[in-house]
Amino acid sequence: MSAADTPVAARYSEVMESETDARWLSEDEQRVWRTHLDVNKLLMYQLERDIQPYGLTMNDYEILVNLSEAEDHRLRMSDLASATLQSKSRLSHQITRMERAGLVRRENCDSDRRGLFAVLTEEGWQTMRHVAPHHVESVREHFIDRLSPEDLRALRDALTPIAEKLRVRRGRG
């Protein structure tokens, strides 16, 4: 087989192996990894498209979910940033946009003058209640219903240790 006939990943791996001690992915591992990346990007793109008619982004929706599940529908901004994997600055801009839309409000923290809470408004709660069934249907259509119950269990079992290790690495274990 000539170099032109060798899959790109294999050629890249051969070149890189000669220049470093890295443990490169096999062709099969590379296919699995790239399929995972494709599914993740494509699924998030589709879910985003499916909630756009409701005036929300996936970031908005994730914030609404976190606040709707929190005690008193409020979270410290630092905790919300951590839960959504956003920097405090990025989250602050996101919350500003959501405040303008009437979905959330900020409140001062009585016990810490520097602390702020993000609080779900009644309009935010009603938006969440309206959009959630559509979002769940989108998740079902594009992900859950594409897999058998056995596939779902296997996927959960395969991904859980990865998620747990990554949570521990970021200090949320």
Image (cartoon, rainbow, N blue to C red):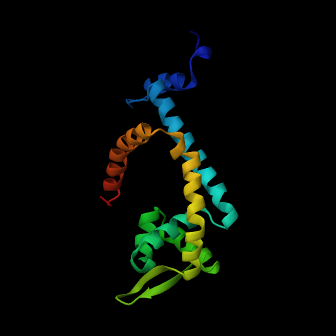
Along the viewing direction, whichever of 12 and 31 lies nearer the viewer: 31
| Whole-percent x, y for residue 24 in the image | 42, 29
Quarter of the image where one finds residue 131: bottom right
Q: 108 and 6: which one is in front?
A: 108
Q: Is residue 18 above or below residue 50?
A: above
The image quadrant that residue 161 belongs to is top left
Residue 80 is situated, as x and y percent measured from the top left of the image, at: 44, 70
Residue at 59 percent of width and 79 percent of height: 123
Which quadrant of the figure contains the N terminus? Answer: top right
In percent of width and height, residue 87 lies at: 48, 66
The residue shown at (57%, 73%) is: 93
Seen from this angle, which residue lies furthest right? 53
Quadrant of the rendering where the C terminus is positioned: bottom left
Residue positioned 61% across, 80% down in the render: 102
Height in image: 157 above or below 80? above
Horizontal and vertical percent for residue 81? 45, 68
Residue 113, above or below 8? below
Q: Residue at x 33, y 61 (%)?
A: 172
Residue 48, quarter of picture: bottom right
- Looking at this view, is 4 or 138 the one in front? 138
25, above or below 61, in the image: above
